[in-house]
């Protein structure tokens, strides 16, 4: 793709070593919505330009076919970048429109690992402070109990996240979520940096519930 002068200028300004996510948000605030520019930045194939592209793309173009193309491109990145990009897409675009929320709701059994991850990550995000949990908790928890151990690591993390949110914010399911973590042992031996919250469900739920009580 031939790049416009504006796209070239932005690519020159974005530096992997010094540019932070906050810097990208400032750039996006100035640019606002510009889907053509977003696609130019996306075509560069680099991590940070693609994050900026996600911020300025037009959600009216986010059909399943278009998302599948983004998904395919994202899979060319390292595992860490891959997860960051698809989560960024969910948080900044897919969760903002009823049409794309409906698409995410259909991804539980998607052949795409990244789209399955987003199905579960979005369900967990619906269970934060101040939000009334959807009525599908029993179904979700049963599905997690049945299949989390067979899932890909990217999806396991998101399923574990959802189980944690259920255990934290829906006390009637808390013991069941803790038991799930004890049974599977997922993240039990994970090394956690000082100040970070562990992903092991019994510890994670206990820490976050204690914070809620303060």
Image (tube, rainbow, N blue to C red):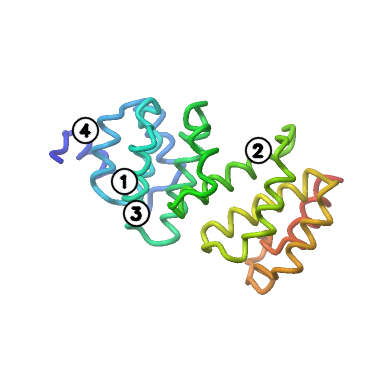
Q: Is residue 4 visible?
A: yes
User: Which residue position is annotated with label 2?
Assistant: 126
User: Which residue position is annotated with label 3?
Assistant: 16
Residue at 71% over, 51% down: 141
Is 153 placed above or below 88 here? below
User: CA gap, disc 3 to disc 2?
Assistant: 32 Å
User: CA gap, disc 4 to disc 1?
Assistant: 13 Å
Asked whether, in this view, residue 139 is left or right of residue 27, the answer is right
Q: Give the mark nearer the N terminus: 3 vs 2.
A: 3
Q: Give the mark nearer the N terminus: 2 vs 4.
A: 4
Q: Give the mark nearer the N terminus: 4 vs 1.
A: 4
Q: Give the mark nearer the N terminus: 3 vs 4.
A: 4
In the rendered image, the quadrant that contains the C terminus is: top right
Is 206 placed above or below 191 here? above
Q: Give the mark nearer the N terminus: 1 vs 2.
A: 1
User: Which residue position is annotated with label 4?
Assistant: 6
- Closest to the observer, 26 or 172: 172
Q: Are marks 4 and 1 in contact (CB under 8 Å)?
A: no
Asked whether, in this view, residue 32 is left or right of residue 185, the answer is left
Q: Position of residue 179 (x, y in %)?
A: 79, 63
Which residue extends farthest bottom?
Answer: 189
Query: Mark 1: few, some, or many residues within 10 Å (few <14, many ≥20)?
Result: some
User: Which residue position is annotated with label 1?
Assistant: 14
């Amino acid at each position: 793709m031939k790049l416009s002068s504006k796209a070239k200028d932005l690519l020159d300004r974005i530096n992997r070593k010094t540019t932070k996510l906050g810097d990208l948000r400032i750039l996006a605030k100035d640019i606002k919505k510009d889907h053509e520019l977003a696609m130019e930045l996306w075509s560069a194939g680099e991590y940070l330009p693609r994050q900026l592209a996600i911020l300025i793309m037009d959600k009216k173009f986010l059909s399943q076919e278009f998302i599948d193309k983004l998904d395919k491109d994202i899979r060319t990145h390292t595992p860490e970048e891959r997860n960051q990009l698809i989560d960024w897409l969910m948080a900044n675009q897919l969760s903002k429109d009823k049409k794309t929320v409906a698409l995410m709701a259909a991804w539980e059994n998607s052949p795409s690992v990244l789209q399955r991850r987003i199905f579960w990550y979005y369900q967990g995000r619906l269970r934060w402070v101040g939000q009334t949990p959807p009525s599908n908790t029993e179904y979700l928890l049963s599905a997690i109990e049945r299949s989390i151990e067979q899932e890909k690591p990217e999806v396991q993390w998101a399923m574990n996240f959802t189980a944690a949110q259920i255990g934290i914010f829906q006390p009637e399911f808390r013991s069941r979520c803790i038991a799930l973590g004890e049974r599977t042992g997922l993240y039990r031996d994970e090394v956690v940096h000082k100040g970070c919250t562990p992903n092991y469900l019994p510890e994670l739920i206990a820490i976050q519930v204690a914070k809620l009580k303060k």
